[in-house]
Image: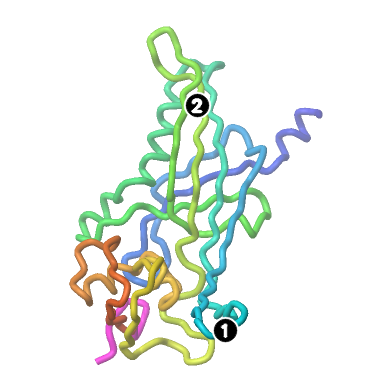
């Protein structure tokens, strides 16, 4: 392949943006951008749907499944970093950039609403793999070191989980949700999943947690009735 053809190839990149300032809002300004040295050799895209069945002791066959909702997309890829030609700290700097996506951004801390940056993977004209999300996992493996111990090569495995699909509070038949509702917890429920069903935004789980005085979002007891606040606008105000 000639140099001219090689240079015209689309370069994949990861962009870190400020998390939304309110439920349903768009992500803020760019925090950092990482242009990948090497385009990924593979991309793994996953999406799930949730169905619920109500068992019946009198039924001869299994009950018909009830569609509950569609889960977020999750994109997994590996990022290869190499500084053997330059022997500089570019590998360390790239890893530090990825690590920023795992901790609250300074601006969100200033707002008293700590949240990690939103992440977007973009590569040419690809649409199914390009969406706003949050980094759900990151694993870094250093494979080569300089004489002073500085890493020269690393492979970073990461997964990006879709953060929102539609504007929060939107319902295709009834418009913005404005009324409070209730939900009875069943096995397998989580606040993030409930927030995604109700608002179209899994990161809005704190709204439900605050409304119910929940300190530990992982300790949901089946049978518990939760209050689900309505959202009047993108700012997350409740309808009074």
Q: Where, quadrant-wise, is the N terminus in this rendering?
A: top right
Span colored in magenta: 231-240
What residue occupies the far top of the structure in this picture?
147
Vertical position of residue 220 compared to residue 1: above or below: below
Other residues around mark 1 within 10 Å, as few (<14) / some (14–19) / many (≥20):
few
Residue 47 x/y as whole percent: 58, 61
Mark 1: which secondary structure?
A: loop
Judge the density around disc 2: few (<14), some (14-19), many (≥20) Cα neighbours within 10 Å.
Answer: many
For image coordinates 72% across by 39% down, the residue present is 8
Q: Which residue is nearer to you in this view: 54 or 23?
A: 54
The number of discs equals: 2
In this rendering, which labeled residue sits more in front, label 1 or label 2?
1
* Residue at point 31%, 81% (across, down): 228
The image shows residue 151 at horizontal and vertical percentages of 44, 19
Residue 90 in percent (x, y) is at 46, 26
- Location of mark 1 (residue): 59
- Residue 232: within the magenta? yes
Q: Is residue 81 above or below residue 178?
A: above
**Residue 168 in sight:** no
Say which mark, if any, is on residue 205.
none
- Residue tagged by mark 2? 154
- Compared across the picture, whether 117 is left or right of 227 comes to right
As drawn, is 128 to the left or to the right of 198? right
Q: Residue at x 36, y 66 (%)?
A: 190
Cα gap from disc 1 to disc 2, whole angstroms = 56 Å
- The first of marks 1 and 2 along the sequence is 1
Res 203 quadrant in image: bottom left
Q: Main secondary structure of the magenta part?
A: loop
């Amino acid at each position: 392949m000639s140099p001219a053809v090689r240079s015209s190839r689309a370069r994949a990149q990861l962009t870190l943006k400020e998390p939304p300032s309110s439920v349903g809002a768009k992500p803020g300004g760019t925090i950092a951008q990482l242009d990948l040295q090497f385009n990924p050799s593979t991309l793994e895209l996953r999406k799930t749907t949730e169905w619920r069945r109500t068992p019946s002791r009198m039924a001869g066959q299994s009950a018909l499944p009830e569609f509950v909702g569609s889960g977020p997309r999750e994109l997994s890829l590996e990022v290869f970093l190499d500084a053997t030609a330059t022997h500089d700290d570019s590998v360390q700097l790239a890893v530090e950039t990825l690590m920023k996506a795992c901790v609250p951004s300074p601006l969100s801390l200033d707002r008293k609403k700590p949240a990690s940056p939103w992440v977007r993977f973009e590569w040419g004209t690809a649409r199914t793999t390009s969406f706003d999300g949050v980094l759900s996992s990151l694993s870094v493996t250093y494979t080569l070191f300089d004489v002073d111990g500085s890493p020269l090569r690393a492979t970073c495995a990461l997964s990006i989980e879709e953060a929102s699909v539609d504007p929060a509070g939107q319902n295709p038949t009834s418009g913005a949700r404005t009324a409070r509702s209730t939900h009875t917890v069943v096995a397998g429920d989580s606040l993030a999943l409930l927030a995604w069903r109700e608002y179209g935004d899994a990161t809005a789980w704190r709204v439900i947690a605050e409304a119910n005085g929940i300190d530990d979002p992982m300790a949901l007891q089946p049978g518990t009735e939760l209050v689900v606040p309505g959202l009047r606008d993108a700012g997350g105000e409740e309808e009074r």
